Image (spheres, helix red, strand yellow):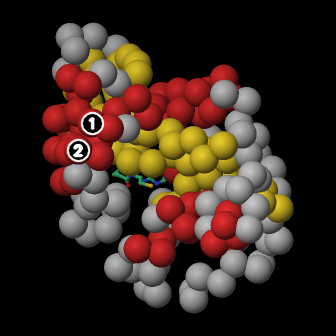
Amino acid sequence: MPDIRVHKAHLQDARNVFDLVNSLSGDGTLLRRSYAEICENIRDFTVAETSDGEFLGCGALHLYGPHLAEVRSIVLRPEAKGQGAGGLLLKALVEEAEQHAVTSVCLFTRIPTFFEHFGFRVAERDAMPDKIYKDCQTCPRLYACDEVAMVRGPLPKVAMLGPSKLQRPELVTLQVGSTNTGR
Ligand SMILES: CC(C)(COP(=O)(O)OP(=O)(O)OC[C@H]1O[C@@H](n2cnc3c(N)ncnc32)[C@H](O)[C@@H]1OP(=O)(O)O)[C@@H](O)C(=O)NCCC(=O)NCCS
């Protein structure tokens, strides 16, 4: 394996992250992110680079709360694939979730086999209503989604986003199967 290191992103990485993430948003592999959104959330990102500081790829950990985090925007430059950098990024994001004592980490993907290498398992998407309310409700693929929901750790028992937050501003007890996404 070449000498690859991963570290938390700095604002100086935002341009590389923006270019790489959006290079794969056209076919739906990754959600499109604006440059402003990436700058605003740059502290979610971890980057992989060579020992010379050449940018290889990135991934992000979005925190919903103590009950759930999400791996997002994990991607390598095409020439950097297959050398272990994706695995290093994913391990760093999982470790970050553990440092925050988050109990469950979720993601939506078309390549579940990659994530199974790192302890993720396929789950019902309704079990992650925070993710659905954050992204899926506004996604043009809402009724034609071909992504698989995965989770590492127990399924979350509470949710923080969605209409029910209007009735209970604190953590909302989750009833699995009650979220109607239309899918
Ligand atoms: C997915 C991606 C991040 C993997 O990064 P990578 O550096 O090539 O992966 P690694 O070299 O660390 O591979 C780790 C393991 O996963 C396996 N793997 C890699 N890519 C895989 C894939 N697409 N499907 C299934 N398994 C895969 C490898 O064979 C390796 O297994 P091994 O440990 O038994 O040898 C990279 O291929 C990529 O950028 N893909 C395009 C963007 C994308 O689809 N991102 C996911 C969005 S949810």
The three-letter amino acid code for the residue at tag 2 is Ala
Within 10 Å of disc 2 (Cα), the crowding (few <14, some 14-19, many 20+) is: few
Looking at the picture, does residue 122 appear above or below residue 1?
Answer: below
The amino acid on which the numbered mark 1 sits, given as a three-letter code, is Cys
Q: Position of residue 131 (x, y in %)?
A: 56, 61
**Residue 65 occupies which quadrant of the picture?**
top right
| Disc 1 and disc 2 in contact, CB within 8 angstroms | yes
Q: Is residue 121 left or right of residue 14?
A: right
> Residue at image x 80%, y 72%?
176
Q: How many marks?
A: 2
Residue 105 - label: none
Quarter of the image for the C terminus: give it: bottom right
| In this picture, residue 6 sits left or right of residue 171 | left
Determine whether, in the image, residue 28 is placed left or right of residue 168: left
Q: Is residue 30 above or below residue 146?
A: above
User: Which residue is found at the position 19% from the left and 54% from the top?
Assistant: 23
Q: Quadrant of residue 15?
A: top left
The answer to whether residue 164 is visible is yes
* Residue 154 vertical position relative to residue 173 in the rendered view, above or below: above
How far separated are the C-alphas under marks 1 and 2?
5 Å
SS category of the residue bearing label 2? helix
Residue 36 — which label?
2
- The reply to whether residue 76 is visible in this rendering is no
Q: Residue 6 placed where, x, y %?
A: 40, 21
In this view, the residue in front, 100 or 72, is: 100
The secondary element bearing badge 1 is classed as: helix
Give the label on residue 39, or none: 1
